[in-house]
Image: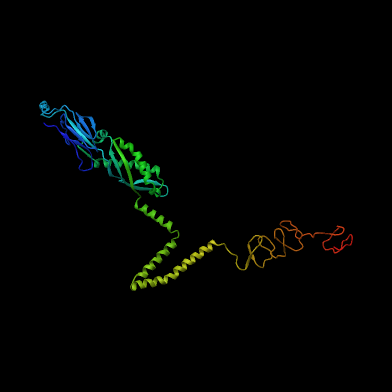
Amino acid sequence: MFLEIIEWFDDTGKALVHRIPESGSGDIKYGAQLIVRESQAGIFFYQGKAVGAFGPGRHTLKTANIPLLTKLAALPWGFESPLRAEVYFANLKTFTNLKWGTRDPVAFKDSELGLIRLRAFGVFNMRVYQPVLFINNLVGTQGVYTTEEIEEYLGQVIISRFNDFMGETIDSILNLPAKYDELAAGLVARLKEDFRHFGLNLTQLYINAITPPPEVQKAIDDRSRMGVFDDMNKLMQMKAAMAMEKAAENEGDAGAGMGAGMGLMMPAMFAQYFQGNQQQQKGNAPEEAPAQTAACEECSNPIPRESKFCPHCGHQQVVFTQCANCKKNITPNTNFCPRCGHPAQEKPQPKHCPKCGAENLSDSLFCNQCGEKM
């Protein structure tokens, strides 16, 4: 008989849509007052159709349901008016901390580790930005529609897109920690259209973790340890030193006995360590000729010190004289070097008479032309 004041408050913080009346339909009367808050939108359905969407404020609803007259006119229908009407309140706030994650591990081909299985987890935020589309496509005629009813479905949509996007973007999970933000931004851009089909807007998406199975994590840990300790002997020596230090800190006979045992083992350990280092240095150093041999000056091969000729190249080892040009050993009275052809002995230069200018031998004391003293 009286006019209605229609409003709604979300006490749970999880309701996306709330319908008044919550069950069945109503005979909202002409002149009913609809009050919509800032974070809401009101959609008025009359005779099964959405006839208006209302923003924040107070609105007067117009129907053919006139108080008192409608009751009399509805006598054939048991005093229930056939002019049915409902109001849907859509919650326009941003719903945060909605979970998404892989239910089963996803196969991923890693460029360094091969085929592995990954799990991914994160959260996302969303809001309703087209209330009529959202109600018609997802809510239907439900009285209350909450985030719990849509969170699982949207999480599966995110996982489906995430699998494809990660396979196109990431080559190895070893590079993942620096690309979480890049992956999240690209995934949001790809999911925008999926959410818009239902009148929803994906505002933010965050990736909390992408984790391989425990055995793959162990393999990664072992690889990082090998990078720190290139030489496993050093690792064993470090562990032995730590064990000795711990044994020294223990008190009592047991600690003393262990310390004595480690004291007996220490010289052998250090001897093995130094022996290994010496062998490594010997392996890197060039081989030296034994004391009873010498290196051939021509071909550098080792030969006995008493050899007069090299058994490899035939070079004479007894030095009489050397070529002034290439330093090859040559025998006395040799006129030209057998290697480079340079004169073995320099030709004496002639002297000229200071009086007549005649040419004389370098060892002449008097000029052979005028008899002048040279």
Residue 294 can be seen in this image: yes
**11 or 155: which is nearer to us?**
11
Residue at the image position 38 percent from the left and 68 percent from the top: 245
From what the image shows, is residue 223 above or below residue 137? below
Mark count? 0
**184 or 164: which is nearer to us?**
184
The quadrant holding residue 123 is top left
Residue 42 spot, x, y in % from top left = 22, 34
Residue at the image position 24 percent from the left and 32 percent from the top: 53
From what the image shows, is residue 244 above or below residue 206? below
Residue 344 spot, x, y in % from top left = 75, 60
By what rule are the colours in the image chosen?
rainbow
**229 or 21: which is nearer to us?**
21
Residue at the image position 41 percent from the left and 66 percent from the top: 241
Residue 181 spot, x, y in % from top left = 37, 45
The extreme bottom residue here reads 253
Residue at the image position 32 percent from the left and 42 percent from the top: 204
